[in-house]
């Protein structure tokens, strides 16, 4: 199992390894730059893929590019909600979510990739508007994640930038596996 797997069934130490690895993907890049660039980068990465390739998993039991695009859109719903809770409330509880259950029960396999990209771009634009207006004091505010403990708004900005890079790499890997 990869350090980049992330399920609700993972032990706390595996979840910590995941977070550390995802944060490491950002390196020295400004997280807001990554967050701004991801919708366009995702669109460019899939522009030449046929509808069939967009829906073909890289291996049995794995996600397709269509899955990843829907996940990016839904994750921006989650991120935006978490950021709003943290910015507007004092130490709010932050629930986790099982990405594989979302993929299964929300029918990611049949999601329209173009609609997913469009939804992702709109949500990201709105979430960035919120973050870009936040003060340093705002970004220091924390929520209490059910699985990971205290997380500041600033930490989440960096974590989601790494999450973007993880899934852009995944899209590239899936696309290469289909050629």
Image (spheres, helix red, strand yellow):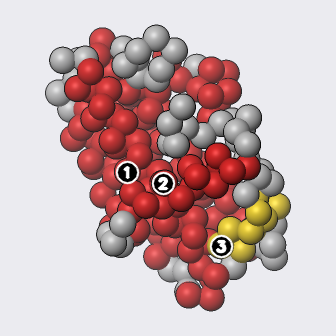
Few, some or many residues within 10 Å of mark 1 (<14, 14–19, 20+): many
Task: Say which residue appears at 69% left-offset and 79% top-offset.
Answer: 141
What's the CA distance linking mark 2 and mark 3?
16 Å
Q: Earlier in the sequence, mark 1 or mark 2?
A: 2
Q: Quadrant of the C terminus?
A: top left
Few, some or many residues within 10 Å of mark 2 (<14, 14–19, 20+): many
- Image spot of residue 57 (x, y percent): 40, 17
Q: Earlier in the sequence, mark 3 or mark 1?
A: 3
Describe residue 97's horizontal placement relative to residue 122 as left or right: right
Q: Is residue 48 above or below residue 140?
A: above
Residue 117: image quadrant is top left
Query: Which circle marks residue 44 in the picture?
Result: none
Task: Say which residue appears at 81% left-offset and 76% top-offset.
Answer: 90
Query: Which circle marks residue 152 in the picture?
Result: 3
Helix, strand or loop at label 2? It is helix
Which residue is disc 2 drawn over?
22
Q: Is residue 131 above or below residue 18?
A: below
Which residue is disc 1 drawn over?
165
- Image spot of residue 159 (x, y percent): 52, 60
- Image spot of residue 146 (x, y percent): 80, 54
Residue 161: image quadrant is bottom left
Q: Are marks 1 and 2 in contact (CB under 8 Å)?
A: yes
Q: Earlier in the sequence, mark 2 or mark 3?
A: 2
- Image spot of residue 80 (x, y percent): 60, 58
């Amino acid at each position: 199992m990869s350090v980049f797997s992330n399920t609700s069934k993972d032990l706390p130490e595996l979840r910590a390894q995941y977070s550390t690895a995802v944060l490491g993907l950002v390196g020295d890049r400004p997280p807001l730059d990554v967050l701004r660039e991801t919708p366009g980068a995702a669109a460019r990465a899939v522009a030449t893929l046929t509808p069939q390739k967009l829906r073909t998993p890289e291996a049995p039991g794995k996600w397709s590019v269509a899955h990843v695009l829907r996940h990016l859109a839904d994750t921006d719903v989650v991120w935006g909600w978490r950021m709003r809770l943290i910015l507007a409330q004092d130490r709010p509880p932050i629930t986790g979510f099982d990405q594989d259950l979302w993929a299964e029960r929300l029918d990611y396999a049949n999601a329209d990739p173009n609609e997913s990209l469009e939804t992702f771009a709109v949500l990201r634009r709105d979430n960035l508007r919120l973050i870009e207006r936040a003060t340093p004091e705002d970004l220091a505010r924390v929520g209490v994640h059910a699985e990971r403990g205290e997380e500041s708004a600033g930490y989440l900005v960096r974590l989601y930038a790494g999450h973007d890079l993880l899934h852009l790499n995944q899209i590239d890997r899936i696309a290469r596996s289909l050629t």
